Image (spheres, rainbow, N blue to C red):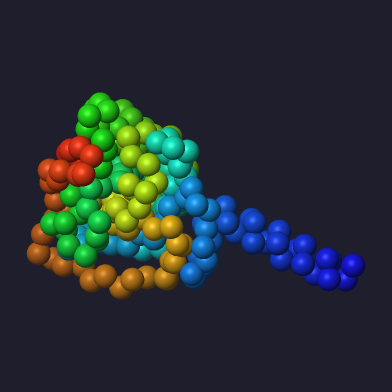
Amino acid sequence: MKCIKVLFPMLLVEAVQAHTFRRTKGKRRNDNVLYACMDTYPEYPGDLEVGGSQIVVQFNGLEIDFHFDLNGVESNCSNCGIHIHSGVTCDSKNEVGGHYWYQNAGADPWTSLGGAVYNSDHNGRAKSNFDINSGYNINQNDGHAVVIHDQNGSRIGCGVLSRDFRCPSSTGRKRSKGSKGSKGSKGTKGKRALRGRGDY
């Protein structure tokens, strides 16, 4: 009986943590969920610091429930973009690519019209979620980059989706003064079909 009293609180804590944005290391999570720990976009020249922002993306087949907990974004940013991109790295701005969706299924869903936006408060915080269908399932999204945009569409944050939730306090990516956030590049051909081309 004493063992049960000790074990039950531990199981309860683990269950709660599996559905929150808490930072943990190496814990295996829900098989239908991808996570991304955001950091500064490569070569972003501005002053916004989004490191520590977190993304949780839940999948039900092709249906996506996209959750975000952002900090350090532009204050009072209205309908600012946050999207999954075709690239699989945040190491180089030239490899992040444009919006990632199954083009044969229809128009780009990663738009304000599609609901892929966040709205921040005066402190640069934003926490909410939206539903979207990109035509790709969890396995096809695993390893892809997530990009945060500011009010004018510039890329300010980047993180890579993973099944394991490992969020360091900061990845320490250095900001370059050399270039501004760039517009999205054309998607590349996937094994199934063309990946979509995003405007941002």
Splitting the image into 4 quarters, where does residue 173 fall? bottom left
Quadrant for the C terminus in the image:
top left
Q: Considering depth in this image, is 12 or 116 the residue closer to the camera?
A: 12
Q: Which residue corresponds to the image point at 43% horizontal and 66% vertical from the top-left?
A: 167
- Residue 195: percent from the left, percent from the top? 20, 40
Q: Position of residue 124 (x, y in %)?
A: 39, 52
The residue lying toward the viewer, choosing from 132 and 130, is 132
Q: Quadrant of the N terminus?
A: bottom right
Viewer can see residue 126: no
Q: Residue furthest front?
A: 191
Q: Residue at x 83, y 66 (%)?
A: 4
Could you tell me residue 132's position as x and y percent? 39, 34
Residue at coordinates 39% horizontally, 58% vertically from top-left? 162
Q: Is residue 164 left or right of residue 101?
A: right
**Residue at x 13%, y 57% (from the top left corner):** 94
Q: Position of residue 30 (x, y in %)?
A: 53, 53
Is residue 95 shown above or below 24?
A: above
Q: As drawn, is 180 to the left or to the right of 129?
A: left
Asked whether residue 7 appears in the rendered view, the answer is: yes
Most extreme residue toward the right is 1
